[in-house]
Amino acid sequence: MPTLFSRILAGELPARFVWQDPEVAAFLSIAPLTPGHTLVVPRREVDQWTDADGELLARCVTVAQAIGRGVRRAWDAPRAGLVIAGFEVPHLHIHVAPAWGMAELDFSRARPETDEAALDDAAARLRTALRELGFTEQVEHEASGG
């Protein structure tokens, strides 16, 4: 049975993609810790990060690092937080979010974002920052379904 993330990656469910390549995609969280909170997800279904082969995990972390640079740039944040929790969806995913302190990484504070415009704005800001950092090939353009 496909995971929620597999359905998003297949285009069956909507998402605001900010990165796509043959192995990994990244899209905004609908329950962000902070604006710009992004999920980095491998296209291959792997339940836990400890089950991923080294190459796939390395690719996910490399993409997470690029997303981290993007969120720091887009929100002028001193840090980009990275968390692999693994409880929400049984499909490996890495949380990357702009952070000003440890409180931004407290998942009990995450709330569903009901303002569609806020999510659209966050996606546009992050895409712009990623393009400025040279990741134009991997960035999903707004015109193709942000």
Image (spheres, grey):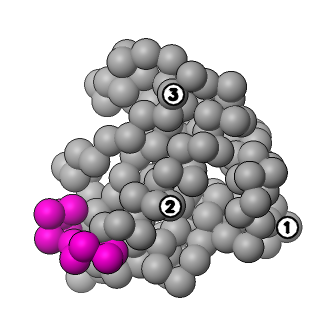
Q: Nearer the viewer, mark 1 or mark 3?
A: 3
Disc 1 vs disc 2: Cβ atoms closer than 8 Å? Answer: no
The structure residue drawn at horizontal position 46% and vertical position 43%, both measured from the top left corner, is: 96
Disc 3 target residue: 79
Q: Amino acid at mark 1?
A: Ala
Query: Is disc 3 placed on a helix, strand or loop?
Result: strand
Is residue 55 highlighted in magenta?
A: yes
The magenta stretch is 47-56
What residue appears at the point 71 percent right and 36 percent down from the top-left corner? Answer: 74
Residue 136 image-quadrant placement = bottom right
Q: Marks 1 and 2, Cα distance to the nearest angstrom? A: 22 Å
Which-is-in-front pick, marks 1 and 2? Answer: 2
Would you say 146 lies left or right of 32 here?
Answer: right
Secondary element at tag 1:
helix
Residues marked 2 and 3 touching at CB (< 8 Å): no
Is residue 9 placed above or below 90 in the rendered structure?
below
Q: How many angstroms separate mark 1 from mark 3 (CA)?
A: 30 Å
Instruction: Return the residue nearer the eye: 31 or 96.
Output: 96
Mark 3 Cα within 10 Å, few/some/many (few <14, many 20+)?
some
For marks 1 and 3, the one nearer the N-term is 3
**86 part of magenta stretch:** no
Task: Indicate whether 60 appears above or below 114.
Answer: below
Amino acid type of the residue tagged 2 in the rendering: Val
* Mark linked to residue 63: 2
Dominant secondary-structure state across the stretch colored magenta? helix
Residue 115: where, in percent of width, then height? 66, 35
